Amino acid sequence: MPGDTLSRIRTLLRDHPVVDGHNDLPWEARERVAYDWDRLDIAVAGQPTHTDVPRLREGGVGAQFWSVFVPATLAGEAAVTATLEQVDAVRTMAARYPETFALATTRAEVEAAWASGRIASLMGAEGGHSIDSSLGTLRMLHALGVRYLTLTHNDNVPWADSATDTPVHGGLSPFGREVVREMNRLGMLVDLSHVSADTMRDALDTTEAPVVFSHSSARAVCDHPRNVPDDVLERLPGNGGVCMVTFVPRFVSQAARDWALEVDDAAAAAGVDTEDAPTFEPWLAQWRVTHELPVVTLDDVVAHVEHVREVVGPGHVGLGGDYDGVDVLPQGLEDVSGYPRLLAALADRGWTDADLGALAGGNALRLLGDAEVRAAEIGATRGPSLARIEDLDGTAH
């Protein structure tokens, strides 16, 4: 790639920093060091994570939605507690590095962080299990600064179907629709990554504000249920939403997707539970000795970005890398320093500076502001919802 293209991109990123939709560093910090930022000092380059401050700076990242993810194996009060611990970890991280990070919840706060030379730190909760079917809990997460909720993670929740679980509701239940409406009223983005295609459609039918896919790619390019079908993408311009393309190999490469399916079949045949990490990971390491993971590259991600733009237009596509949420990333995008290489590849394919700036962060920034405007409008006509899942769905909480 010509050096002048990369120089052009670095100049562009000074005015249009990357706003990334999804980074799992908080959970990595929990797993590796029990949230001890002295032991995982991300101010120092070369950490074992995909993310540290020098690489964020090199990557032109100006705002990051940190995922306050907890696994679906946690449920009920345990999920809520762990989510609060994740929120605390992000707030502690920002306080530990005040010269680098500024907590942000609004478009104005993101722009103020940029003006001070800092990286805006936003939070997104990954999975409706984090609210334990309680709108009061949802409101408290919003009060603590969480600005999107992914309606499900890998498993269904009592009110919404996941992309990677057996459908139960056929999309959203009545209470699930109320969750969407309450998020609209709060100004919390409805994140449709991880949900089933029917849940996507139900949410788009219900929402009164733009939605986001914080880290999803295009199903037409790679047939994985975590990706977004074209009929759903086609609705984003009318809704005002944004699809933030992810870099996860099995979501962007059909060869990697097929390899992952082969892993599932082989594990099942060997009686190995893929959800039981202490058993599955050693088995997978041995299996990979004779079954090499297909090579996935930056060009595979380019194909998704270009397809999404073709379907939705340049005003509704963004980036959500999912760094520190997966073990392997595409060649050229191995860590958070890789965004300029991706943008340069698109520039070499004819993308204008205006479209590259919109992709990098302009669209996500617009989305955040639009959600705030809609929340003010909705809040002028209705107050907090007192709905309970047992009343709407007939399900005990």
Image (spheres, grey):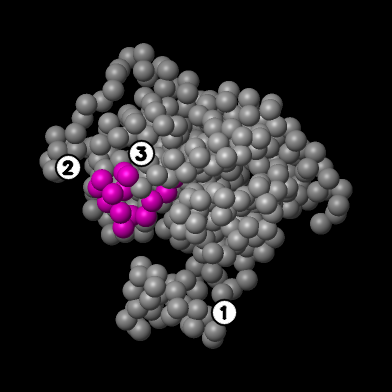
Determine the residue positioned at 69% across, 54% down.
45
Of label 1 and label 2, which has the lower sequence position? 1
Whether residue 298 appears in this view of the structure is no
Determine the residue positioned at 59% across, 32% down.
102
Say if the magenta span includes residue 77. yes
Q: What SS does tag 3 mark?
A: helix
Task: Point out the frontmost of discs 3 and 1.
Answer: 1
Front residue (pair 345, 372) = 372
The amino acid on which the numbered mark 3 sits, given as a three-letter code, is Ala
Q: What SS does tag 1 mark?
A: loop
Q: Is residue 347 left or right of residue 380?
A: right
The amino acid on which the numbered mark 2 sits, given as a three-letter code, is His
Q: Answer few, some or many: residues within 10 Å of disc 1's Cα (few below 14, many 20 plus, some between 14 and 19).
A: few
Determine the residue positioned at 43% across, 45% down.
86
Whether residue 261 appears in this view of the structure is yes
Of label 3 and label 2, which has the lower sequence position? 3
Magenta part of the chain: 68-81
Task: Point out the frontmost of discs 1 and 2.
Answer: 2
Q: Which of the labelled discs sits on residue 388, or is there none?
A: none
Task: Point out the frontmost of discs 3 and 2.
Answer: 2
Alpha-carbon span between mark 3 and mark 2: 22 Å
Q: Which of the labelled discs sits on residue 203, or is there none?
A: 3
Q: What SS does tag 2 mark?
A: loop
Alpha-carbon span between mark 1 and mark 2: 45 Å
Q: Is residue 264 left or right of residue 62?
A: left
Q: Which of the labelled discs sits on residue 292, or is there none?
A: 1
Front residue (pair 308, 138) = 138
The amino acid on which the numbered mark 1 sits, given as a three-letter code, is Glu
Say if the magenta span includes residue 254. no
Q: Is residue 214 left or right of residue 334?
A: left
The answer to the question of whether label 1 and label 2 lie on touching residues, with beta carbons closer than 8 A, is: no
Residue that carries the numbered disc 2 in the rendered image? 397
